[in-house]
Image (cartoon, rainbow, N blue to C red):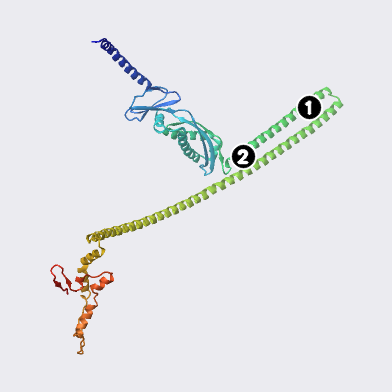
Amino acid sequence: MTFLQLQVESLAPLLAIGFAILFVFMILLTFVRRYKRCPSDRILVVYGKVGTGNSARCIHGGASFIWPVIQDYEYLDLTPISIEVNLVNALSKQNIRVNVPSRFTIGISTEPGVMQNAAERLLGQGLEQIQELAKEIIFGQLRLVVASMDIEEINNDRDKFLTNISNSVESELKKVGLKLINVNITDIVDESGYIEALGKEAAAHAINAARKSVAEKVRDGSIGEANAVQDQRTQVAAANAKAVEGENLAKINVANSDSLRRQREAEAERVAIASEKVQSAKALEESYIAEQAAEVTRAERERSTQLADIIVPAEIDKKKVEIDAEAEAERTRRRARGDADAILFKAQAEAQGIFEIMTKQAEGFDRIVKAAGNSSQDAVLLLIADKLPELVKLQSEAIKNIKIDKVTVWENGSSKDGKTATSNFISGMYGSVPPLQDMFNMAGMELPEYLKGKKVEDGNDDAVTELN
């Protein structure tokens, strides 16, 4: 045993151990690479063989081992999606069309059941496809919510309007694995101006109430001021009266003071009453103007309601009649198209049949010509020879069915060429039948000599035969 062989035998166990370690390391590396951790802003969807009755397993905020070959994985992004929904011409409960521009913020839900719906219906779809799907759902539910509420309710109770939208939209979005995060209604506008009229009416009432309150405060202030002046003057007059008590001048001053006080009190009272009446009159005037505007708006609303009740059903009936007429015209066109197709198919079938017959006849004629040694004249003679019994039969049939009960021939004793009148009559009748020679002449052919009744010589036995 050589030294090299000894070295190889000593290294063989080491090589086996090394290969085993490498194999185990590769297996561990594969297992490590197949262990996937799920980020907080994503959903890990494991699909393949994930359990009986389950199409996928969803993991949020955890990790899972993905078995090779039998399983695979993808991620669903939880980033919020903003969708602009501009609802136009939506019918409310009062049949008034309104525009509801809004913006919805949605995202893939992390609830267990809803997350499973997202894995089944949204996996593999892009952001634009998810936006279009959610937009269609939001449009439909937003129209339903608007149709279930009055204009006053939509305009005055925005919280209820948003709550109805959230409940309706979110229940439908959950079916495809989405969640409604936020709803923002920017403005609500109707084509008839009904919402604007309601705002003007409310503003007019508020302005009238404010003006009335101001007038009442001014009135109370004037009365209070007059009462304060009255108290002040009374006290001063009483003090002066006590100071100059017994004196005539004091009495005169007090009398003058009392007269002036009474005049000023009357003037103040007159001014206060006049101001109160003026303010009341202005408040009534403004109230009447606001009520007049409200009545005009209400009349316009009634007119719009009447138009919606009469014109809209009429337009619907008109559209229905047009659709029925178009459907009847389409049925008529389809029946006509079917009849034309049937006639065309029948004509094509008949043409195909004629073509097949002519083709087969041409093939038969070609074989007859080849059998006649490529001689067209001999081929025609073969055909005529084949049809000769029928031709002879036709000649005999020409006079076969002539019914002659009685024939009277007057003889005068004269004859020509040894023939009597009776024989001439019979021969003339037979002569009316076209002979074979004339039929061949009309066809541009020559009747064979042995069919003309002439003598032909036979080259073999020199016999002479006469055909009668």
Q: Which mark is residue 241?
A: none
Image spot of residue 397 (x, y percent)? 21, 73
Q: Give whichever of 201, 348 is nearer the camera.
A: 348
Q: Residue at x 41, y 29 (%)?
A: 115
Q: Which mark is residue 200?
A: 2
Above or below, 224 against 393 in this view is above
Tell me if residue 132 can be seen: yes
Q: Give whichever of 358, 141 is nearer the camera.
A: 358
Tell me if residue 168 can be seen: no
Q: Quadrant of the N terminus?
A: top left
- Which residue in the structure is indicated by mark 1? 233
Image spot of residue 70 (x, y percent)? 33, 27
Give the mark nearest the N terminus, 1 or 2: 2
Image spot of residue 224 (x, y percent)? 72, 29
In terms of secondary structure, where does tag 1 sit?
Answer: helix
Determine whether, in the image, residue 283 is placed left or right of residue 412: right
Q: Nearer the viewer, mark 1 or mark 2?
A: 2
Q: Residue at x 15, y 68 (%)?
A: 459
Which of the 4 quarters of the picture holds residue 264? top right
Determine whether, in the image, residue 109 is placed left or right of residue 271: left
Q: Quadrant of the C terminus?
A: bottom left
Instruction: Calculate the distance from the C-alpha at mark 1 to the C-alpha at mark 2.
Output: 49 Å
In terms of secondary structure, where does tag 2 sit?
Answer: helix
Which class describes the residues within 10 Å of circle 1: few (<14), some (14-19), or many (20+)? Answer: some
Above or below, 428 against 366 in this view is below
Q: Give whichever of 35, 179 is nearer the camera.
A: 35
Which of the 4 quarters of the picture holds residue 419? bottom left
Tell me the amino acid under the disc marked 1.
Arg
Q: Residue at x 35, y 21 (%)?
A: 30
Number of numbered labels in the structure image: 2
Q: Give whichever of 416, 318 is nearer the camera.
A: 416
